[in-house]
Amino acid sequence: MGHITFGVELEAAFFYSSKPDHNTDSESRNTNYARVVDMSFEAIRSRDPNSARPTCEREYIVEMMKLVARTINNFVDRLPHTYRGRVVSYTGKPELDWYRRWRVETDSSIVLDKADYDNLDFAGLEIQSPAMYATHGASREIKAVTNMLRVNFRTAVPHSCGLHVHVGAGFDFLPLETLRKLAAICWAGDHLLHRMHSQCRRHNGYCLGPRIKSKLAYGRKAGHYNPPYDLPHPLPSVRHHYMSPIEHEIHTRAIYSELMFNEPFEEVHGINVMSGSLELLLCRSRNAVACLMDTDLRGAYNFDHYGDFDKETKDDTKRTVEFRQADGSMDGD
């Protein structure tokens, strides 16, 4: 496998006002707040003389999206070389050039109570980094962009926001052996990884762990999705060792044990750490891995880009596994 590559998606609410020179009481009390973006028609035309007058909320949000995107790309162009990541080159694949630059998209899943924010209007936006090699320069670039946005835009990160990290191998898809091992680790460690995040993320239907909701958790087997057994993929070797009574009890527990106190999850019996991991290691295709990890709503660990069900064509999909359960943040540190 080649070098590891990654990209991040930052979700946040960006506040604006369609009234000229809008100042809130909170600004006068606390000068540490970034200013609310002036989205009056005069301000919009001063930034882009070709802009039309917005006539509805959706058009204001689009103007905010364009402004944030311009601000990011102008800022990144001025960063020193040591603060830049090395972007993945998709030579010969123009349809993947989309992933080589910073992008901003609207996100209707971002919700908040405007009464908590001086009744300001906001645009729910998702900031998407380029696909970059995992280097110190890439980390510095993402940190610099995140901190710049926090300084220049009044933002909020309500519970509906997340931080998503896409991990891949550049132009190539992850090898089957790597993919099934990664899925097995996510399955086996789900109850530990799950506890690292806040309750609002753990209970979010769009980032539930595979041991709460996945085809594997509900009893599907690798054999349901494997191609005919005429492919040259060897079965994974299994190293047996003696388990202590305590280890055996842990590995044969129901999916969520008594240690998961105060968690309103229904236990799914029969598929434990060992049996679930083995099913994933028995997968003979990337599609089989993706199908077993599928939660219908992408889940905490999104393998959908490796499933045949997610492809409109073979060339227009990402080549990543997406980690989705982390809390949203606009703090570069």
Image: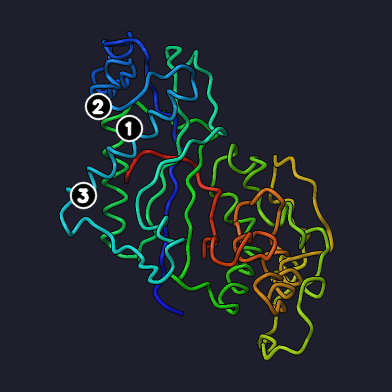
| Rendered image quadrant of residue 279 | bottom right
User: Which residue, given by chain and number where applicable, does mark 3 sit on?
Assistant: 77
Circle count: 3
Q: Earlier in the sequence, mark 1 or mark 2?
A: 2
The residue under label 3 is which amino acid type?
Asp
Decide which of 174, 112 is in the foreground and name it.
174
Secondary-structure class at tag 2: helix
* 10 Å crowding of disc 2: few (<14), some (14-19), many (20+): few
**Whole-Å distance between the Cαs marked 1 and 3?**
16 Å
The residue under label 1 is which amino acid type?
Leu
The spot of residue 123 in percent (x, y) is 45, 27
Is residue 60 placed above or below 204 in the rendered structure?
above
User: Which residue, given by chain and number where applicable, does mark 1 sit on?
Assistant: 67
Q: In the picture provided, is 204 more to the left or to the right than 83?
A: right
Is residue 314 placed above or below 70 in the rendered structure?
below
The spot of residue 21 in percent (x, y) is 26, 11
Residues at badges 2 and 3 in contact (C-beta under 8 Å)?
Answer: no
* 10 Å crowding of disc 1: few (<14), some (14-19), many (20+): some
**Label annotation for residue 47:** 2
Residue ID at (60%, 39%)? 199
**Whole-Å distance between the Cαs marked 2 and 3?**
19 Å
The spot of residue 93 in percent (x, y) is 44, 67
